[in-house]
Image: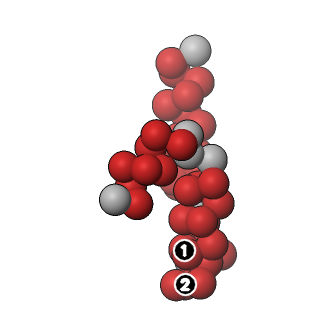
Amino acid sequence: MKRHIINLVILFTAFQTTSFACGIKGHALVAEVAFNYLDPATRKVLTE
């Protein structure tokens, strides 16, 4: 199983393209989505 995960990581990093470069607005959107998935205790620590 560990070997499969390593192979997937290599596969995804080997074939990255410029489509992953989303600029400032894209990064802000991803950060907002990730923030919404945090549990309340972690959100509190980050916003203090």
Q: Which residue is mark 1?
A: 27
Question: Decide: marks 1, 2 in contact (CB < 8 A)?
Answer: yes
Give the residue type at disc 1: His
Q: Measured along the vertical axis of the image, is residue 45 above or below residue 22?
A: above
> Which element is circle 1 on?
helix
- Residue pictured at 54% horizontal, 65% vertical: 31
Q: Which residue is mark 2?
A: 23
Spatial CA distance of label 1 from label 2 is 6 Å
Horizontal side, residue 45 vs residue 5: left or right: left
- The image position of residue 15, as x and y in percent, is 59, 59
Give the residue type at disc 2: Gly
Q: Residues within 10 Å of mark 1 (few under 14, many from 20)?
A: few
The front one of 19 and 43 is 43
The front one of 1 and 38 is 38
Quadrant placement of the C terminus: bottom left
Can residue 42 be seen here? yes
Can residue 15 be seen here? no
The front one of 8 and 44 is 44
- Residue pictured at 40% horizontal, 60% vertical: 47
- The image position of residue 10, as x and y in percent, is 51, 43
- The image position of residue 28, as x and y in percent, is 55, 75
Horizontal side, residue 17 vs residue 48: left or right: right
- Residue pictured at 55% horizontal, 28% vertical: 5
Q: Measured along the vertical axis of the image, is residue 40 above or below residue 27?
A: above
